[in-house]
Amino acid sequence: MYKISLITGDGIGPELSESAISVLNTINDKTDVKFEITKLLAGDIALKEKGKALPDETLAAIKNSDVCLKAPVGESAADVIVVLRRMLDLYANIRPAKSYPHMPALRDDIDMVIVRENTEDLYTGKEFSLGNASVALRIISENASKRIAKYAFEIAKQRDGMRKVTCVHKSNVMRITDGMFAKACADVAKDYPDITFEQMYVDACAMNLIRQPHQFDVVVTTNLFGDILSDESSQVVGGLGMAPAANIGDKFALFEPVHGAAFDIAGQNIANPSSFLLSIKMMFDWLAAKHNDSKCTEIGQKLESIIFGLVKDGIKTKDIGGDKTTAEFTAEITNRF
Ligand code: NAI
């Protein structure tokens, strides 16, 4: 029995959470993998109701669980997810982007993963005013850079195909911080002679993601660049509604969509729950590896194949050209499980 903590979030978060609970309950009923779900408050709603975006009881419940699912939160995201990533040392943010048949991708041969350093850079939130100037500290350490580079190479090692790691930075301008990141990645690359290593400036990477996205395999980069590039890579393969993500540490992991609370479509029952459900697929893969539980792998694969089977059959939400509501799309998934 796995204990899953679930932050229900803001904006479209509660709708995505309802979808996730419905699918998880179906898995609980129809398969041998069992779990209990604890719904938790965090984000704008928690700030309003409890006076804190990440209430103590939410944090305690997460720490007491085997794994955390997080629907998107709103304006208080920095006080929730950025804090959780650092507090739980979830140093690797994994954001895959793959073109699937019948999806509105730029090309049909894209299969890449962004590995984003998740604990440092400008996202440490160390900002202050200095007279009439505003200052933000960009912190890049050798240890964290080597740790994420190693993670990226280990992912590349397990992948089929080109097995290439592209280190993305801007060391021609930020010579000390990105210079250290680039050197750390290049040092780690020496331990992986079978994997191609290349370096690319972040502006060129943003352009190449449009021009030749199929040339990427594993991209390793710093926190802010990874955040921006992964929104772009998601759009390149069809949109944020299909974009999952994992935040992984040595002991714990948290799974959430790439996107935010999407207030522009909240409460309309039109959000695509696939981003969250494919994050749950990643959760099953992580549980399978951690607990040596092959049943979790099977369930993750089944969930993914049901989602893309629906897309193939033209059963889609509005963001990818369909007419199904969030609830209708979810019901189709549970029916096929
Ligand atoms: P967003 O990622 O929420 O939305 C960008 C666009 O993508 C919107 O047009 C939205 O409708 C669309 N979209 C996103 N998810 C979708 C889905 N599942 N189905 C269909 N369409 C979808 O970005 P935005 O609007 O800049 O941010 C909204 C809020 O989310 C902000 O308050 C921000 O702070 C927060 N945020 C939270 C994050 C987190 O919880 N990890 C990450 C990013 C933003």
Image: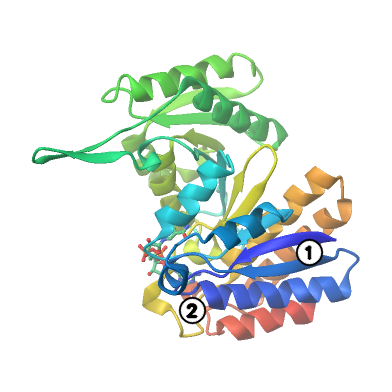
Q: Nearer the viewer, residue 155 or 48?
A: 48
Pinpoint residue 292: horizontal percent, then vertical percent. Answer: 86, 45
Q: Report the residue at 81% width, 49% height from top.
A: 288
Residue 112 vertical placement versus 282 (above, below): above
Mark 2, Cα crowd under 10 Å, few <14 / some 14-19 / many 20+, is some
- In the picture as drawn, the residue positioned furthest to the left comes out as 132
Q: Report the residue at 53% width, 14% height from top.
A: 187
Cβ of mark 2 under 8 Å from ligand 1: the answer is: yes
Type of the residue with mark 2: Lys
The answer to whether 99 appears left or right of 252 in the picture is left
Mark 1, Cα crowd under 10 Å, few <14 / some 14-19 / many 20+, is some
Q: State the mark number for residue 172.
A: none
Q: Earlier in the sequence, mark 1 or mark 2?
A: 1
Residue ID for mark 1: 302
Give ligand 1's quarter of the image: bottom left
Q: How is the image coloured?
A: rainbow
Task: Choose top left, top right, bottom left or bottom right for residue 44.
Answer: bottom left
Q: Quadrant of the image for the N terminus?
A: bottom right
Q: State the mark number for residue 318.
A: 2
Residue 63 vertical placement versus 315 (above, below): above
Q: Nearer the viewer, residue 73 or 175?
A: 73
Q: Does the rendering let one see residue 247?
A: yes
The answer to whether 18 appears left or right of 125 in the picture is right
Q: Does the rendering let one see residue 106?
A: no
Callouts 1 and 2 close, C-beta under 8 Å: no
Pinpoint residue 137: horizontal percent, then vertical percent. Answer: 30, 33
